[in-house]
Image: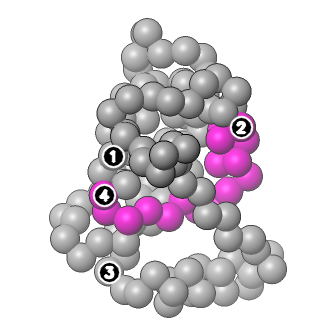
Amino acid sequence: MRNVLYAINVTIDGCFGHTQTIADEEVLAYDTQLIREADLLVFGRKTYQLMIPYWPDVIKDPSATETEKEFARTFDCKNKIVFSRSLDRAEGNTRIVRTRLQDEILTVTWIFLHNL
């Protein structure tokens, strides 16, 4: 059976502002490893729109650290689904899903298990 890993960035006071970087090199390297092991990244519309185009742009940013670029490359190459009823289009290897999250996750898991 596949594992579902739920990950969210939260500060100690319960907030996370996506306009400022709070992850240090060690945290970002750890996050990169988690994403490397994932088969699929799953987002809601708001989080997806925060992640894209931010991380793909980091790959081209000469001021980005190598750890940031490695996370960005790893993130960029993964298959993604975004759950949204209002998003018109998605970038690259991202598929928009308009059905219930539970139904889609069960479908994706079933397809994966039968392709092993």
Which of discs 2 and 3 lies nearer the camera? The answer is 2
Disc 4 is placed on an element classified as helix
Element at label 3: loop
Disc 3 or 1, which lies upstream in sequence? 1
Name the one closer to the observer, 37 or 17. 17
Disc 2 to disc 4, C-alpha distance: 24 Å
The answer to if 27 sits in the magenta stretch is no
Which residue type does callout 1 highlight?
A: Leu
111 left or right of 76? Answer: right
Q: Mark 4 — residue?
A: 46
Above or below: residue 52 compared with residue 81:
above
Q: Based on the displayed image, in which of its 4 quarters is residue 46 positioned?
A: bottom left
Amino acid residing under circle 3: Arg
What residue lies at 74% left-to-right and 71% top-to-bottom?
3
Q: Residue at x 40, y 17 (%)?
A: 61
User: Which numbered dot is residue 30?
Assistant: 2
Count residues near mark 4 (Cα–Cα under 10 Å), then give few for <14, some for 14-19, many for 20+.
few
Q: Which numbered disc, 2 or 4, marks the residue that appears first in the sequence?
A: 2
Q: Magenta part of the protein: which range? A: 30-46
Tag 1's secondary structure? helix
The residue where tag 3 is placed is 98
Name the residue carrying label 1: 50
Of labels 3 and 1, the one closer to you = 1
